[in-house]
């Protein structure tokens, strides 16, 4: 698609691309980062975030009834924000010292889906289901939504189909909630998707269709199959406003948690948030939300695998979602399931362009090392994708970003967003941990 000349001209404009093409770890600071005063108007607003939060509230009684594990939180799906000082001390033994406090946003503990996809994926299906039921005159917004678990609604939703293309967590989240509501749901996966994920989906009554070859083929085939059916709805990870909106609510919740823990965010107390990035929807949505709340006092960074820097490639070349990592010669292969993405989200990337402070890339072996270190220090298990953010605090320190922006790092709060891990079976956990042990011992 892109000629060699074209790629060469991208490299000339942005020399960092040379290292990106060689799959070397890079630290990129975003030249298009703008102060919140100057950012263009986006198609979604703070008001949309508040409305999204209300939709979650309406569905709380549904969750309590349909998923008893959400009873203790009254049907609100949220995860703790935990300080990880032992991990910070361990990291500080090598490389730059992290100044300020280090926290983990524990979305690997989110109920049901066990990953950050419980925010975006669930939200998109809830919004769709609500609209169908409202339009059919079966539901009013004032109703107690536990009624959605009744046979009448199951029957109603069973006449509607949902499709999604996903190698992992998105498929799990869309599959679980859609099947519970009664939809006929199909998850399109690449044939190399983890067996335990496919088994789990089938167990819950989800149809799983496998495709040979790359994951993008699965998305493409899923999209075609779903769109050819007028009664079917496709969740499009590569261009979804509703997924994005679901993620923004995470920002409102973090703000509340920071307040509860008496942690200040202002000109003298910078907040840093580090998110593992696949298509850029979850990190983009939370960054958007945090920027609405904390404006220029929050600094959002993404972390991508060296072999699949989809958002980074889109932003550095300026081609956004038109370009894929395969176009610059990368193989898009990583053990980090959630981040194995060749092309960024069209919707999210346009927004992130002006809001994020930078992107770092990380090698797979480093993900495993962080996984083992976090388990050893804090007794917290994450899936490999979810550890990516932990590489960032030291890279920020090293990058000179704080100096340019005149930030008081002594007062900084760092949050690494832990995006998944709860559902990983014990056997896989052990393999991941052991792989990390090798890395810990050689360094
Ligand atoms: C999906 C996912 C991400 C990245 O989210 P995107 O919206 O694809 O950027 C990160 N970590 C995990 C565990 C995920 O499942």
Image: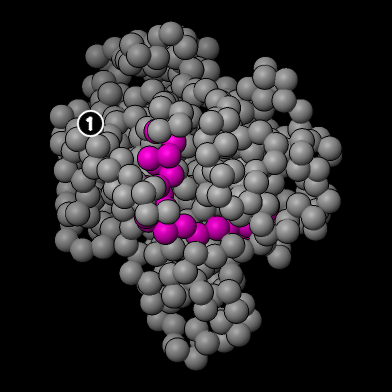
Point 39% across, 33% down: residue: 375
Name the spot of residue 76 as percent of width and height, x first.
48, 17
Dividing the image into 4 quarters, which one contains the N terminus? bottom left
Q: Which residue is mark 1?
A: 426
Residue 20 visible (yes or no)? yes
Asked if 437 appears above or below 57 in the picture, the reply is: below
Displayed quadrant of residue 376:
top left
Residue ID at (80%, 58%): 404
Q: Is residue 362 magenta?
A: yes
115 up-or-down from 192: above or below: above
Tell me: residue 292, above or below residue 86.
below
Q: Considering depth in this image, is 371 or 28 the residue closer to the camera? A: 371
Badge 1 marks a residue whose secondary structure is helix
Is 217 positioned to the left or the right of 275 in the image?
left
| Residue at mark 1: C-beta within 8 A of ligand 1 | no
Answer with the quarter of the image where residue 207 lies. Answer: top left
114 to the left or right of 246: left
Q: How many marks?
A: 1
Q: Residue at x 21, y 46 (%)?
A: 194
- For the point 73% across and 51% down, the residue is 41
Q: Is residue 279 visible?
A: no
Judge by depth and name the residue closer to the eye, 383 or 125: 383
Mostly what secondary structure, the magenta segment?
A: helix
Q: How is the image coloured?
A: one colour
**Residue 324 left/right relative to 320:** left
15, 187: nearer the viewer: 15
Residue range (magenta) = 349-375
Where residue 408 appears, x then y in whole percent? 81, 43
Label 1: how many Cα within 10 Å (few below 14, some 14–19, many 20+):
few
């Amino acid at each position: 698609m892109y000629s060699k000349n074209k790629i060469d001209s991208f490299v000339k404009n942005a020399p960092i691309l040379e290292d990106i093409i060689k799959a070397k770890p890079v630290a990129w600071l975003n030249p298009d980062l703008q102060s919140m005063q100057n950012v263009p108007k986006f198609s979604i607003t703070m008001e949309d975030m508040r409305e999204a939060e209300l939709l979650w509230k309406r569905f709380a009684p549904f969750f309590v009834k349909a998923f008893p594990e959400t009873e203790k939180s009254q049907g609100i799906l949220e995860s703790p924000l935990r300080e990880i000082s032992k991990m910070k001390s361990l990291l500080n033994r090598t490389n730059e010292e992290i100044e300020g406090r280090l926290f983990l946003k524990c979305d690997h503990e989110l109920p049901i889906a066990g990953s950050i996809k419980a925010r975006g994926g669930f939200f998109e299906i809830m919004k769709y289901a609500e609209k169908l039921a409202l339009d059919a005159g079966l539901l009013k917004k004032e109703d107690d939504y536990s009624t959605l678990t009744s046979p009448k609604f199951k029957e109603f939703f069973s006449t509607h189909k949902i499709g999604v293309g996903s190698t992992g967590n998105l498929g799990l989240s869309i599959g679980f909630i859609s099947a519970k509501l009664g939809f006929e749901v199909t998850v399109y996966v690449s044939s190399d998707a983890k067996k335990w994920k496919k088994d789990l989906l089938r167990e819950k009554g989800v149809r799983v269709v496998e495709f040979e070859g790359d994951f993008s083929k699965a998305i493409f085939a899923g999209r075609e199959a779903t769109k050819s059916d007028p009664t079917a709805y496709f969740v499009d990870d590569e261009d979804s406003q509703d997924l994005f909106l679901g993620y923004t609510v995470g920002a409102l919740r973090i703000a509340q948690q920071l307040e509860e823990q008496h942690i200040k965010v202002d000109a003298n107390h910078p907040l840093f948030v580090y998110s593992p990035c696949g298509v850029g929807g979850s990190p983009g949505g939370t960054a958007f939300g945090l920027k609405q709340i904390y404006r220029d006092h929050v600094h959002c960074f993404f972390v991508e695998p060296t072999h699949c820097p989809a958002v980074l490639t889109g932003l550095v070349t300026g081609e956004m979602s038109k370009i894929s990592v395969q176009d610059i010669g990368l193989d898009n292969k990583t053990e980090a399931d959630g981040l194995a993405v060749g092309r960024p989200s069209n919707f999210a990337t346009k927004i992130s362009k002006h809001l994020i402070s930078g992107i770092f890339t990380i090698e797979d072996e480093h993900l495993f090392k962080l996984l083992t270190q976090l388990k050893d220090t804090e007794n917290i298990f994450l899936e490999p994708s979810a550890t990516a953010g932990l590489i960032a605090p030291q890279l920020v320190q090293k990058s000179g970003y704080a100096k340019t922006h005149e930030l008081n790092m002594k007062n900084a709060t760092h949050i690494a967003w832990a995006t998944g891990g709860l559902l990983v079976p014990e056997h896989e956990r052990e393999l991941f941990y052991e792989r990390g042990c090798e890395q810990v011992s050689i360094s």
